[in-house]
Image (cartoon, helix red, strand yellow):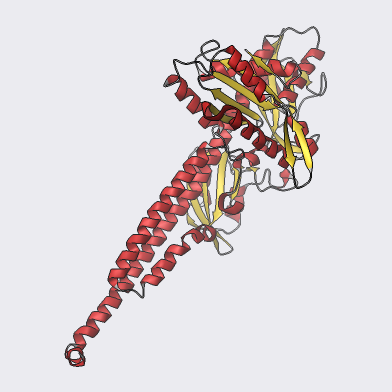
Amino acid sequence: MLKLFFKHEKIIILSVAGAVFLIFCTLFVFRRQVNQSTRKDMKDQIEAIQKNCVREINNEMDSLKYLNETTANFMSGLTLDDDSGIADMLDNYARSAHIKRTLFITFDGDIYTNSAEKTGLPPGVVIKNFKGLSAVRGSTFTQPWYSEELGQMLFGVISPMSIGDQAGLLISAHPLSNFYDLFQNDFLGGTSEIGILNQDGTTILGRITDDHRNEFGLNAIDALINGGIIFSSHSADGMLHDFRNGVEGYSSYYVSGTERLCSYAPVRYNGWYVVVIAQESILREQSVQMERHGIWLAVKLIFIMAVLLAIILFARLREQKQVREQLQKAAMMDGMTGILNRGTAENQIIRYLKQEGKDKSHAVFLIDVDCFKAVNDTYGHITGDCILRELAEHLQKCFGPSGLIGRMGGDEFIVLWKDCGNMEMIQKQAERLLTPLSYSDSKNGVTVPFTISVGISRYKEDGETFIELYQHADEALYHTKQNGRNGYSIE
C-alpha cells in the first residue's frame, strides 16, 4: 500500500488538493447564493408585512367611510322639531359607533356636536376652507389634528347630509392611534417599526409614545437627508419622488453602522403611505442555520457536500413554502380573535351565496358588544381584547361548522348561518346567542359580565347580495340598540 502511495504520491496529493480546492470553491459559491437568497427573502418578508398593513388600513377606512355615509343617509331622511334633536342624533351615533366626536356643519355656518347643540368652528386643520364646504360631493377623509379637549390625535370622515332644510356635512372623528391595533406588530418580535407618512414625508403615525404629538408632523425624509445617512439602495430623494407619485418601493440605508431595510406603499386615501422598517441583522438571524451547514460542508468530501447541499436546498424550499402559507393565513385571519378578518369574511360570504349556497336558506347575524367603550374604560383594553376573543369562541360554539364567522372591525362580528332553516330556527339560535356571557380573569380573580346586541337579515327575503344583507342586518342591529340592547331584531 505504501509503495502504491509513494508511486502515485504526486497524483494523490494533487487529487486531494484539487478536491479541497473544489470544496472551498463550492462553499464560496454556496455562501454567495445563500446571501443572495437571504437578501431576497428579507425583502419579501418586509414587503409582506407592509402589504398586510396597507390592506388592514384600507379595510378600516372603507368601513369608517361606509358607516359615516350610511348614517348620513339615514339621518337625512329624518324630520326634527328643534335643534336639540340634532345633538341627540349625533350623540346616539357617537355612542353606538364608539366615535370620539361627531359634528354636523351646515353650509350656513352653524355647527352641532354630540356634546352640545351648537359650538364654534372646529380647528382649522379639520376644515381649512369653511366657505368651500358646499363643494364636497361625496364621503372623504380629513388630515389628522390634535384635540386639546380629548388629548389625542384624530382624523375625520366627512359625508354630505341634509336635515330638514339644513344642508351640510356629517363629520365623525376617530383616534389615529386605532391604527396601532390594526398593525398587530409581532413581526420579528415587535422589533420592526411601522408608521404612516404623508406624501411629503411628514409623519402621521410614528413610534408609540406617551404623547402621540412627539413624532406627528416631523418630516422623516428630511431627517434622512439631513442626518448623513448612507443609502445602499434607493436614496431619500428617490423615496420622496415615489411618495409624491403614489408609487410603492423599497430602500436600504445605514444608521450608526447598522443596515435598515425599508418597504413602503400608498394606502387608498389621503395620500398616506405605510412604511415598515426592520434591521438587516435581525432579519438575517433567520438564515444563520443555513450558513452553519455551509461551514460544516467545508470539511466533507465532495459527494457528502453535494448530498448536504441538496438537503439544505430542500429544507429552504420547505421553509419558504411554510412562510408563504403562514403569510397567506395571516392575511386571511383576524390577528386578535383568530377568526376571519373583514375582507376574507366578506369575500367568502359573497362566493358562497353565488355558488353552492345560492338555492338554500341562510341568515346573516351582525353582533357587537354592548357599551364596549365603557368596558375598555372601566377594565382596560387588555380585558376588552379578552372579551372579544371570548365572544369569538362563543360564536364558534353556537354556530359550529355551519357558521361562516368574521370580525368586521372593533367589536362588530358577522356570521353567515348556512342552511339555517325557518324563522323559528333563527329565533332559537338568536336566543342561544344571548345566553349570559362573561370573561373570568383567574389571575386577578375578576369576572366581567357583558351582553351583546344582534341584528339579523335573511337571504332572499331581505336581499341576495352581501351588501343588501349587511345593510338590513345593520338596520336590525340599530333597532336592537334603540330598544335597550341585550337582544336581537330580525329585519
Q: Position of residue 438 (x, y in %)?
A: 73, 34
Residue 257 in the figure: left or right of residue 128: left
Q: Specify the quadrant of the image occupied by residue 435.
A: top right
Front position in the image: 241 or 181: 181
User: Which residue is painted at 69% across and 39% down in the image?
Assistant: 386
User: Which residue is painted at 62% across and 23% down in the image?
Assistant: 366
Specify the quadrant that holds the C terminus. top right
Specify the quadrant that holds the N terminus. bottom left
Q: Position of residue 280 (x, y in %)?
A: 52, 58
Residue 253, compared with residue 304, is above or below; it is above
Front position in the image: 333 or 143: 333
The answer to whether residue 248 of the structure is visible from this angle is no
Residue 194 in the figure: left or right of residue 9: right
Q: Position of residue 10 (x, y in %)?
A: 20, 87
The answer to whether residue 471 of the structure is visible from this angle is yes
Front position in the image: 272 or 96: 96
How many numbered discs sit on the rendered protein?
A: 0
Q: Position of residue 450 (x, y in %)?
A: 74, 30
Residue 59 in the figure: left or right of residue 120: left
Residue 50 in the figure: left or right of residue 19: right
Q: Specify the quadrant of the image occupied by residue 144.
A: top right
